[in-house]
């Protein structure tokens, strides 16, 4: 609704670019703060371990292809994380 369509005496909400930017920055900071200072759940810890596993595995596969062409020993592949190692009684999941 533009200011032309507003009846007299009714205030339009202020939505300036600056105020929207402040809201975005506050939301971004809140998300960062929570990720830094709130203990992750066991599921989040497991998800991070799996992300690390997959990225390391992909990297080592690429490197091992190059090493094989040069006749070098391949890098060891990482062990896949076991979900039950991350789900403990303290975390509420088992």
Image: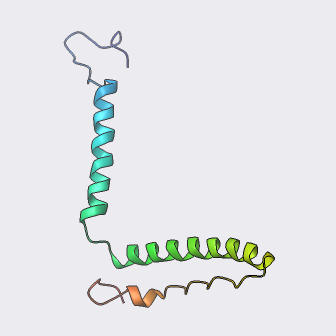
Between residue 91 and residue 79, name the one nearer to us.
Answer: 79
Q: Which percent across, then down, holds residue 91?
A: 29, 83
Q: Residue at x 32, y 32 (%)?
A: 20
Between residue 70 and residue 3, name the one nearer to us.
Answer: 70
Q: Is residue 89 above or below residue 58?
A: below
Res. 69 image quadrant: bottom right
Residue 10 horizontal side relative to residue 47, left or right: left
Residue 72 horizontal side relative to residue 47, left or right: right
Q: Is residue 82 above or below residue 25?
A: below
Looking at the figure, which quarter contains the N terminus? top left
Q: Which percent across, then down, holds residue 8?
A: 23, 9
Q: Is residue 42 above or below residue 11?
A: below
Q: Residue at x 74, y 72 (%)?
A: 66
In this view, which residue lies farthest toward the right? 69
Q: Residue at x 31, y 54 (%)?
A: 31
Q: Which percent across, then down, holds residue 34?
A: 27, 60
Q: Residue at x 36, y 90 (%)?
A: 94
């Amino acid at each position: 609704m533009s200011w032309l369509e507003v009846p007299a005496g009714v205030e339009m909400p202020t939505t300036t670019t600056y105020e929207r930017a402040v809201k975005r920055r506050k939301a971004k900071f809140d998300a960062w703060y929570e990720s830094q200072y709130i203990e992750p759940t066991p599921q989040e810890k497991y998800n991070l371990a799996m992300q690390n596993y997959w990225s390391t595995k992909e990297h080592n596969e690429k490197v091992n292809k190059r090493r094989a062409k040069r006749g070098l020993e391949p890098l060891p592949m990482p062990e896949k994380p076991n979900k039950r190692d991350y789900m403990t009684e303290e975390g509420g999941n088992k």
